Amino acid sequence: MFKLIIICLFVLIQIKCQDGDGMDEAKKLYQELHGDIELEENSNENNQEQEDEKECEATKQDEQIYMAKQLSKVVLEEQIEKITKRLSDINVQIESLKYNMPTNEKSDECLEFKDCAACTKNAKCGWCSMEEKCVAGDNIAPFYTMCNFYNYLYCAGECARYVDCDSCVKDTACGWCEDQPHIIISCVQLDGDGIQCPQNYLIGDGSDKCPKRQLIVLKTVNNKKRKETKAEEPNSKNSERGWEDNYVMVRQGRYKERMNALKENASPSGAAVGTNELDRLYDEKATLEKKLNSYQKQYKKLVGEGGEDGQDENADE
């Protein structure tokens, strides 16, 4: 294009030069056009340099982002490998502990529950509120583990400190629960709907009064215990809380007997230590599994953002 303009100018100059008078005018016109052409060429060169610099900068940024992603992938891969190996080791340790424990200590079914609600749905388990763990037990106490504020088939919460109906219902957050088939009478924490008693009835919300009833000796109490209980409470036949008082006395007695037996049998190298170690391993396993799940999601996202490279890596895996 510029060459064509120069040729046209040259022809124009030749024409004007023939009459002599237009020589100076032609030279001036040529110089002006030539100067404009040089300015335009310089401007184009500057624009090209700027475009090249922008492209170079963008390439550097892309490379930096790519390197950062590659580094993140390497770190995540190392963490995933490390956690996977530790989980494998934990599973081996758990199986070894379970194998070497006495048969009656293998309570891993209960140890897997991590909150009171899930734990107390299983009739083989009970929840220790202070220790915050689920252990094997019945309606009286745990079988193999020392426990404070034991809950069975329900979550009593702080209301467990009340041992009779009258003191229980004075606290509007609590309700008195009776479930005779499961031999449960206890003060339980009320939830939003006031429902935490497994069966029969629940007295709560501060409006209901504890019922009057005659002494009923529990079927699970043997004849000797029954006679001793009657002898200790000769006037309780017509008492308002005879049934509850008798139940609480017998239940607390059996609870203390079992706790004392556990204290006598516990030793630093005994099965109780093995159970505690199982608890620790299950807790560590749950924590690591959460971390592993998070790292795997992050890694999958990074690989997905890699475009075709990420798809190729996925295909190779």
Image: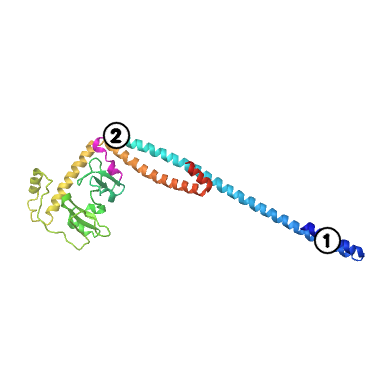
Quadrant in the picture for the N terminus = bottom right
Disc 2 vs disc 1: which is toward the camera?
Answer: 1
Distance, label 2 to label 1, CA atoms, is: 103 Å
Q: Is residue 27 visible?
A: no
Mark closer to the chain start, 2 or 1 = 1
| Identity, as a three-letter code, of the amino acid under mark 2 | Tyr
The residue positioned 80% from the left and 60% from the top of the image is 5
Q: Secondary structure at mark 2?
A: helix
What's the colour scheme? rainbow
What amino acid is found at the position of numbered circle 1 in the picture? Leu
Q: On screen, 168 above or below 285?
A: below
Q: Position of residue 91 (x, y in %)?
A: 35, 38
Q: Nearer the viewer, residue 71 or 146?
A: 71
For label 1, the residue is: 9
Tell me the SS state at disc 1. helix
Closest to the observer, 195 or 310: 310
Which of the pair 210/63 is nearer the observer?
63
Residue 67 visible in this rendered orientation of the protein: yes
Number of other residues with Cα within 10 Å of mark 2, as a class: few under 14, some 14 to 19, many 20 or more? few
Relative side of 7 to 292, left or right: right
Magenta residues (range):
97-112
List the residue tagged with mark 2: 99
Q: Main secondary structure of the magenta part?
A: helix
Quadrant location of residue 212? bottom left
Inspect the magenta stretch and tell me whether residue 138 lies in it: no
Where 170 sits versus 275, above or below? below
Eyeballing the image, is 233 above or below 100? below
Q: Position of residue 152 (x, y in %)?
A: 23, 48
